[in-house]
Amino acid sequence: MTLLVLIVLIAVVALVVVGVGVGLLVGGNRRKTPPAGGGTGVISPPEAPTERPVEATVEAPVEVPPAPAEVPAAPTLEKPESTASRLVRLRQRLAGSQGGLGRGLLALLSRDRLDEDTWESIEDTLLTADVGVAPTQELVEKLRTRLRVEGGSAADVRAVVREELLALVDPTMDRRLQVTGADGKPGVVLVVGVNGAGKTTSVGKIARILVAEDRRVVLGAADTFRAAAVEQLATWGERVGVDVVRGPEGTDPASVAFDAVKEGVDTGADTVIVDTAGRLQNKAGLMDELGKVKRVIEKQAPVTEVLLVLDATTGQNGMIQARVFREVVDVTGIVLTKLDGSAKGGIVVAVQRELGVPVKLVGLGEGADDLAPFDAGAFVDALLGG
């Protein structure tokens, strides 16, 4: 009986415990369910605070100093070669291009017997080298006389030929460039010649020779009918820091020449070099144009030098050009270009005889400093190959 009561009591207690647990579970769930009317009896988690928009801080604009304007770098000026080193190269270049004439002469004159056929061959050699008819006959007569009287060894023959060739080239001619004016005015050099002879290039190269001697130079681009000539001269000037006076294409050449000389006078330049047109359509037109250029220039300063540029490779055609310009202007000196490209060095003798004026400068290549003062002794030695 007692055992039965104990079991009943245990069962009752168990039921009570289960009931309490179920009630707690149901009550807990009921508290978590929101009321149907949306009442306020439920504690909801606090809403996240609404963040106020952060006002953007407007910074005052920072003034950036303007970048300094780029100053173009000054062009690097070239240093022209000195006259002394040009003369060294003159001898080397001439020996390479002109030695054939001298060697041919020496071979003929060194024969055991100098008969008429030999002398005819000597004349042909000289004429082929463009020495010219009159100078050739003169040289042959002198050689005939001296070798008949003096005779001698090969060394003696060479000495005789050198003396006579040197006399023919005439070392007594004044080959100095007249590039200095009087009364504080610049020297004015007028450069003439046909297009294609290297006239404009020669103007640029002469400027380099003068700059190497520390002279202040102004160039006048008066070959106004060829835009390429004007641009070419401007480039030559830029390379050595020389001012170039130019005008629009087709400008009156005399006007440009006048302005160039005026600038030379105003700036205290030592020398003004004027490049002129090289057209040869007719002698009258050329005479009128060059005559006008010279007259206009001389309102500012006297012309101290008129240089005629001739292409050594043209031979007798160059002589025809020389005659025309001699009749048009008072040529005072000759610039002989492309002498290294021709074995006809006799043109030096022929053109000097034709014009009665000296070869003053010779061109020996396409380099910027391949223009050198003419040296009669160096030229004859080059002809003889030594």
Image (tube, helix red, strand yellow):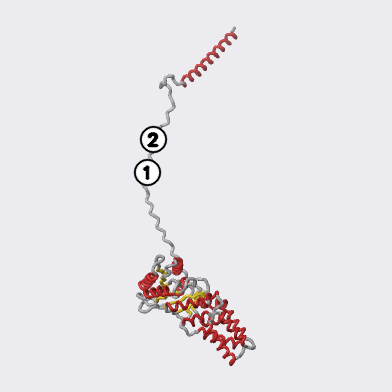
Task: Tell me the crowding category of disc 1: few under 14, some 14 to 19, or many 20 or more residues within 10 angstroms, Cα based.
Answer: few
Viewer-proximal residue among 262 and 345: 345
Q: Earlier in the sequence, mark 1 or mark 2?
A: 2
Report the side of 21 relative to 258 (left or right): right
* Residue positioned most to the right: 112
| Secondary element at image label 1 | loop
The image position of residue 337, as x and y in percent, is 50, 75
Residue 255 visible to an observer of this rendering: yes
Viewer-proximal residue among 41 and 114: 114
* Residue 36: assigned label: none
Q: Dividing the image into 4 quarters, which one contains the C terminus?
A: bottom right
Q: Which residue is mark 1?
A: 58
Q: Amino acid at mark 1?
A: Val
Task: Tell me the crowding category of disc 2: few under 14, some 14 to 19, or many 20 or more residues within 10 angstroms, Cα based.
Answer: few
Report which quarter residue 246 is drawn in. bottom left
The image position of residue 40, as x and y in percent, is 40, 22
| Secondary element at image label 2 | loop
Q: In this picture, is 284 found above or below 12? A: below
The image position of residue 210, as x and y in percent, is 44, 75
Q: In this picture, is 62 found above or below 373? A: above
* Residue 52: assigned label: 2
Viewer-proximal residue among 6 and 44: 44
The image position of residue 57, as x and y in percent, is 38, 42
Q: Amino acid at mark 2?
A: Arg
* Residue positioned most to the bottom: 149
Query: In 3D space, how far apart are the residues under numbered discs 1 and 2 (Cα atoms)?
Result: 18 Å
Viewer-proximal residue among 31 and 108: 108
* Number of numbered discs visible in the structure rendering: 2
Residue 271 visible to an observer of this rendering: no
For the residues carrying marks 1 and 2, which lies nearer the camera in this image?
A: 1
Q: In this picture, is 295 found above or below 65? A: below
Q: Dividing the image into 4 quarters, which one contains the N terminus?
A: top right
